[in-house]
Image (spheres, helix red, strand yellow):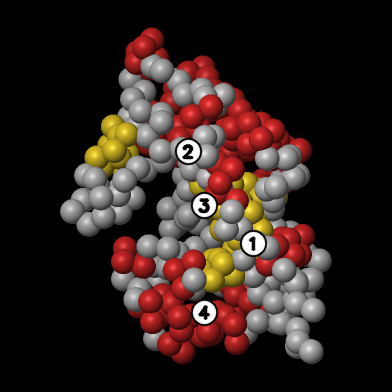
Amino acid sequence: MAMSSYEVVRRAVEFTGPDRLPLRFSTLGLSDTHTVNWNQIGTGDHAQRETVDEWGCTWVRSEVANMGQVKGHPLADWAALAHFRWPAADNPAFYEGMETRFADAGDRYILTGIFMLLFERMHALHGFENTLRDLYLERENIEMLADRIVEFDLGIIENIGRRFPGQIHGFSFTDDWGTERAGFISTKLFDTFFKPCYKRLFDAMHAQGWHVWMHTCGRVDAYIDSLIEAGVNVLNLQQPRVFGDLATFGRRFAGRVCLESLCDIQHTLPFADDDAIREEARLLIEHWGTPQGGFILSDYGDGQAIGVPLEKKQMMLEAFLAADRWKKPQP
């Protein structure tokens, strides 16, 4: 008998032998996971040129509908702290109607999460350059900012866990940490400032019985050991080619953390031919997974932004399915 979607994902994350490759490919109508969101505004309505999220950050978009980027940083000047209104995690409006979003879950693995967990929220509020600079020049203020964000996140975790005990399996979030060449800060600073914050958050997620799912872009391999030590269970890395040789990266990290990926969204998918895509799919399955699991195929949802038509995504999906090392013959 085939495993349920929940069991396939759980076993891949925990390295206990799924019976096929887990999929998160909603653009093609395939997903072993189901997300139950609370009422965070996040980036807001992408059809609007400007929106404001629950932290007061202003998102601006071009004429092409997309996520956009933060152009209005409400705490760009520390003087704004005097009148800044912090969001309250206990606000019941954040959770109204959330229970109805479980209805279509079926037998899937259920995720919830926070958009922009820590570092991204810090620079959305204070500005990117300001945040990097003030890690050195305004340590008291930057520590206060991180602490307030962590306290809010812990409140969201506690509220969701209390409202839906035993119903959620994983907690996902985003924190991009690098360019295509390197991480934004030194490993030492990451370990002394950010790792304890992540450890505190990951411990709270694990206390609810959830796996920790983190998306991060860029060449972030310098931080992965620290994230594993802090307790991350799944790393969503959508630019595998920034790490160089896929086999070398796999030797470092496969089997220590479940890797969620696809063919590189900036190099391979938009520009490579079908044979190169098939070969990269094979290499990722071979080197980023293990015989016991540890790999999840996850689509990059915004095909328009990276110039990848659905037909190409379909071909990539078929390439991964053809390389599936875990697929068991069904009776």
- Of the two numbered discs 2 and 1 in the rendering, the one whose residue sits closer to the viewer: 1
Q: Residue 106 got which mark?
A: 1
Task: Point out the tag, 1 or 4, that comes first from the N-terminus.
Answer: 1
| Cα–Cα gap, marks 1 and 4 | 23 Å
* Residue underneath mark 2: 39
- Of the two numbered discs 3 and 1 in the rendering, the one whose residue sits closer to the viewer: 1
Q: Work out whether residue 215 or residue 267 is closer to the camera in this orientation and state it.
A: 215
The residue type indicated by label 3 comes to Thr
* Residue underneath mark 4: 317
Q: Residue at x 37, y 34 (%)?
A: 53
Element marked by disc 2: loop
| Cα–Cα gap, marks 3 and 1 | 28 Å
Task: Point out the tag, 3 or 4, that comes first from the N-terminus.
Answer: 3
Task: Point out the tag, 3 or 2, that comes first from the N-terminus.
Answer: 2
List x then y, in percent, for residue 237: 54, 60
The residue type indicated by label 1 comes to Gly
Q: Residue at x 52, y 52 (%)?
A: 216
- Of the two numbered discs 2 and 4 in the rendering, the one whose residue sits closer to the viewer: 2
List x then y, in percent, for residue 258: 68, 61
